[in-house]
Image (tube, rainbow, N blue to C red):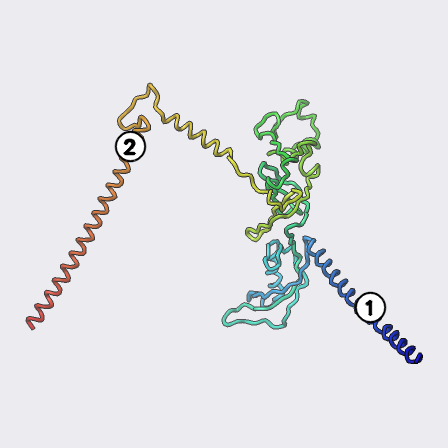
Amino acid sequence: MPEPSTKKRKQSSTANDVDVPTKKSKKSGKEKRDKKHKEKGKEKGKARDTEFQVVRTSLVLSIAPIFASNPRAGVEEMLDSMVMRYIPALQGVVLSHSGLRFLSSVATIQADCPFLVCKVEFDATVWSPHVGMKLVGKVNLCSPDHVSLLLHRTFNVSIPRHHIPKGEWEFEYGPAENDPEFGPDAHHEGGEDKVDAGETEGTSEKHDGDGGGKWVHHLTGEKLGASDGFLEFTVIGLTVANEMLSLLGSIQPDPFSPAHVPETGSSPKTDHAESDMEEVQREVEPGEDEEEDEDEVGSDEDTFAALGKMTDRAAAAEAAAKRETEAAALAEKEKKRKRKAEKAEGRKQKKAKS
């Protein structure tokens, strides 16, 4: 009796020994696959976070007959025309191309068209920023409505007023161009001969950059963009116009919050318009010493009466014109009816004679 019990224990222990490593191997395989997927996801995320990308793409092009002896030159010329243009298929601006390769050794000619149709493959260096990306640009222009930046000395960025923190930054107007004291033609007290060339260059650059004003911090007085003029922003929109790409940026801590919307209210233009209307009404009212002619309007009642008369005259003229057109139409119908009757009478007479 004790022998079979010991055998059963040995079999169970061996079975357990066999099962355990198989389960571990399955888990290790799953962990490896998960790690691979995570690494691929990280690589894709890193590639997406960069604004410059190299994309391998293919195109079907029609080469002009003049390049029949050298089709490669024709393809390169067509690819050169794509540089610095926004291409929707590549989702960015093409900066350069390289690695041109024909996917077929034979080109086709369709019907009577003399152009050579071929498929090519090449590497395109693309500038493709996306919404949510943080970039750094240099302040180019400041105004009460927006701040303009230049990115990589080439691309335009606009930061509207409602995407600048209102409690931190305020706009400070610069001197007027025709101001003799602070304008570009201002004379220094020491005379023009005592001013160094470096100082004149610095003042000219300052006037060029801050001529219309600047955004400053309300506590420290620091200029927006610091001394070097570089400013970090978040991309909140892309604008494509005439195959050119420009960005819409924000320096708010939460740029995608619905609270950052343009302020609506009475603008200074409407206030000026109301004041102009008041002045016009004052000019229209007659004074005590002014003479009142028959054709002039002397009061509000006369004005409304004159307008009523003009309206009545216009309505009467329109009614008279309508009556004339209706009478002309009736006369034309009567003439047509008489002609038909005469023709029918002539036919009856002809039949009677025959």
Q: Quadrant of the N terminus?
A: bottom right
Residue type, label 1: Lys
Secondary element type, mark 2? helix
Q: Residues within 10 Å of mark 1 (few under 14, many from 20)?
A: few
Q: Residues within 10 Å of mark 2 (few under 14, many from 20)?
A: some
Q: Position of residue 70 (x, y in %)?
A: 61, 66
Residue nearer the viewer, 292 or 37: 37
Please give the name of the residue rendered at 61% of the width and 34% of the height, measured from the top-left corner.
171
Q: Quadrant of residue 350?
A: bottom left
Q: Position of residue 311 (x, y in %)?
A: 28, 38
What residue did someone put label 1 on?
24
Residue type, label 2: Ala
Q: Quadrant of residue 57?
A: bottom right
Please give the name of the residue rendered at 66% of the width and 46% of the height, measured from the top-left corner.
234
**333, above or below 318, in the image:** below
Q: Position of residue 312 (x, y in %)?
A: 26, 38
**119, above or below 135, in the image:** below
The mark lying in front, picked from 2 and 1, is 1
**279, above or below 13, in the image:** above
Question: Is 172 situated left or right of 4 in this image?
Answer: left
Question: Is 319 situated left or right of 18 in this image?
Answer: left
Answer whether residue 241 is visible to the viewer in this image.
yes
Please give the name of the residue rendered at 68% of the width and 26% of the height, measured from the top-left corner.
193
Mark pair 2, 1: CA separation: 101 Å
Residue nearer the viewer, 215 or 318: 318
Answer whether residue 210 is visible to the viewer in this image.
no
First along the sequence among labels 2 and 1: 1
What residue did someone put label 2 on?
306
